[in-house]
Image (cartoon, rainbow, N blue to C red):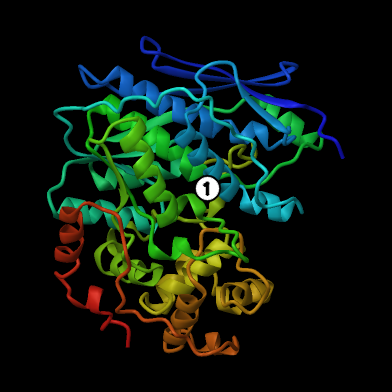
């Protein structure tokens, strides 16, 4: 079927320092227009580098366009101004194609070669040298991973601020307990996109972490921060089905590509990396239980019901459960905590024993790799879920009802990362307070 629109057009982007507002404008054949806005309502560094900021916000402009482009997949992509260099076109084509892999898969569309970015032949921007950058921004997701990063950085006396895009009330007690400044960026999607989706336009997963990457770098420039420190683990690299990875924009491949983009197009002085990349989800869960459980067990949540873009009006912040107890994310987190958390505490946290829920049995088999695909969620590797359930049988003997091949997971293994050397040392030193965190000896 011929797409109803021929062109997706990047019209313009602008930043107004007085209102702290970034405005992004797009159109479909200049017949349907979209306007997305971000507000950065925090104090800016006195002399932030405006050129570097412009380049970071241009990257955000291109990445945010993916939400509107995917509604109709026009065969042409055009820029009214600010066209792409050859290397930029290559980066965005790869990021969009890989990041929309799940979208293409679930809508039965071709996976590769579908994004028509082209280069203009313009000269590459000169990356900006930025002096006097200090400290870090730590994106806060509300789950165990970013809390582990925050506590490790606190132990190491690293200066940092937590950071989110969006205002999610359930995070407030968590940020207060972390005890460092918290920055919020406000995002307003064009409501016309939701109207089009409801009328039948294509919809599905986008690489949101790639959008957050550019916004994180822009925020770091505005605050005069040196590092944007993620909490993505090794298991984000594992495909969900075939070569489609729900977590592509959390993978090491994307991280390294983005690092190159920042160095070549924005500034070589800003670092973007994941502190937890060498670790598996299971190892991070183990560290979380030892370092963070008493402090955050009633505050943290990874369930995606906490992050709906259009929350149900009937649900209030106080009434909404932090764990729905019915989704793949809940089943996964329950599984990897089960070897380490006392049975009564874990069941109380989720409101029930998820291993006994018959409605979740098919979900557990997806997590265990016994079906065509893993769940399309941010969940761990198949082998580590198998290992977790093997180790959980002491606390949860009913988990033995799930039949699967013996796990080949190695809890002692450390994995490649792309973080600065001193943060590799920090990770090792501040988990070697309990050497078993790295060695795996806590898992019997």
The structure residue drawn at horizontal position 40% and vertical position 56%, both measured from the top left corner, is: 252
* Residue sitting farthest toward the front: 121
Q: Is residue 99 above or below residue 334?
A: above
Q: Secondary structure at mark 1?
A: helix
Q: Please give the residue where the numbered disc 1 appears in the rendered image.
A: 306
- Quadrant for the N terminus in the image: top right
The structure residue drawn at horizontal position 62% and vertical position 37%, both measured from the top left corner, is: 310
- Quadrant for the C terminus in the image: bottom left
Q: Residue 133 vs residue 214: left or right?
A: left
* Residue sitting farthest toward the right: 1
Q: Position of residue 60 (x, y in %)?
A: 47, 30
Q: Position of residue 345 (x, y in %)?
A: 40, 71
Q: Quadrant of residue 284?
A: bottom left
User: Between residues 303 and 18, which one lies in front from this camera angle?
Assistant: 18
Q: Residues within 10 Å of mark 1 (few under 14, many from 20)?
A: many
Q: Position of residue 22 (x, y in %)?
A: 46, 19
Q: Position of residue 66 (x, y in %)?
A: 60, 35
* Residue sitting farthest toward the top: 18
User: Between residues 198 and 236, which one lies in front from this camera angle?
Assistant: 236
The structure residue drawn at horizontal position 32% and vertical position 68%, both measured from the top left corner, is: 415
User: Between residues 418 and 182, which one lies in front from this camera angle?
Assistant: 418
């Amino acid at each position: 079927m011929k797409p109803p629109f021929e062109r997706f057009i990047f019209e313009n982007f602008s930043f107004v320092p007085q209102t702290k507002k970034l405005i992004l404008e797009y159109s479909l054949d200049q017949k349907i227009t979209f306007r997305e806005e971000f507000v950065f309502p925090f104090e800016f560094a006195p002399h932030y580098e405006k050129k570097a900021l412009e380049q970071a916000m241009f990257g955000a402009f291109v990445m945010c366009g993916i939400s509107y482009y995917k509604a109709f997949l026009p065969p042409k992509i055009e820029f009214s101004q600010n066209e792409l260099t050859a290397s930029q076109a290559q980066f965005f084509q790869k990021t969009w194609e890989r990041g929309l892999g799940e979208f293409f898969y679930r809508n039965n569309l071709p996976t590769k070669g579908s994004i028509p970015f082209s280069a203009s032949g313009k000269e590459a921007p000169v990356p900006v040298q930025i002096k006097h950058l200090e400290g870090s921004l730590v994106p806060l997701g509300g789950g165990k991973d970013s809390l582990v990063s925050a506590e490790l950085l606190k132990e190491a006396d690293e200066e940092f601020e937590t950071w989110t895009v969006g205002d999610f009330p359930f995070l407030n007690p968590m940020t207060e307990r972390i005890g460092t400044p918290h920055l919020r960026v406000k995002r307003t999607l064009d409501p016309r996109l939701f109207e089009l989706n409801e009328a039948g336009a294509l919809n599905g997963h986008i690489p949101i972490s790639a959008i957050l990457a550019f916004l994180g770098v822009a925020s770091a420039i505005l605050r005069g921060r040196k590092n944007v420190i993620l909490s993505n683990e090794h298991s984000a690299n594992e495909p969900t089905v075939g070569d489609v990875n729900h977590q592509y924009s959390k993978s090491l491949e994307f991280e390294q590509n983005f690092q190159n983009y920042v160095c070549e197009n924005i500034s070589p002085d800003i670092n973007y990396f994941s502190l937890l990349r060498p670790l598996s989800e299971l190892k991070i869960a183990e560290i979380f239980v030892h370092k963070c459980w008493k402090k955050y067990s009633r505050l943290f949540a990874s369930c995606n019901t906490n992050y709906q873009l259009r929350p149900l009006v009937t649900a209030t912040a106080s009434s909404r459960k932090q764990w729905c107890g019915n989704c793949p994310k809940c089943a996964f987190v329950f599984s990897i905590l089960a070897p380490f958390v006392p049975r009564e505490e874990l069941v109380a946290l989720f409101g029930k024993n998820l291993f006994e829920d018959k409605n979740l049995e098919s979900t557990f088999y997806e997590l265990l790799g016994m079906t065509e695909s893993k769940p399309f969620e941010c969940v761990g590797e198949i082998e580590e879920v198998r290992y977790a359930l093997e180790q959980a049988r002491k606390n949860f003997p009913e988990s033995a009802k799930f039949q699967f091949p013996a796990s080949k997971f190695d809890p002692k293994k450390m994995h490649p990362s792309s973080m600065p050397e001193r943060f590799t040392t920090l990770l090792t030193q501040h988990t070697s307070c309990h050497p078993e965190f790295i060695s795996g000896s806590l898992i019997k």
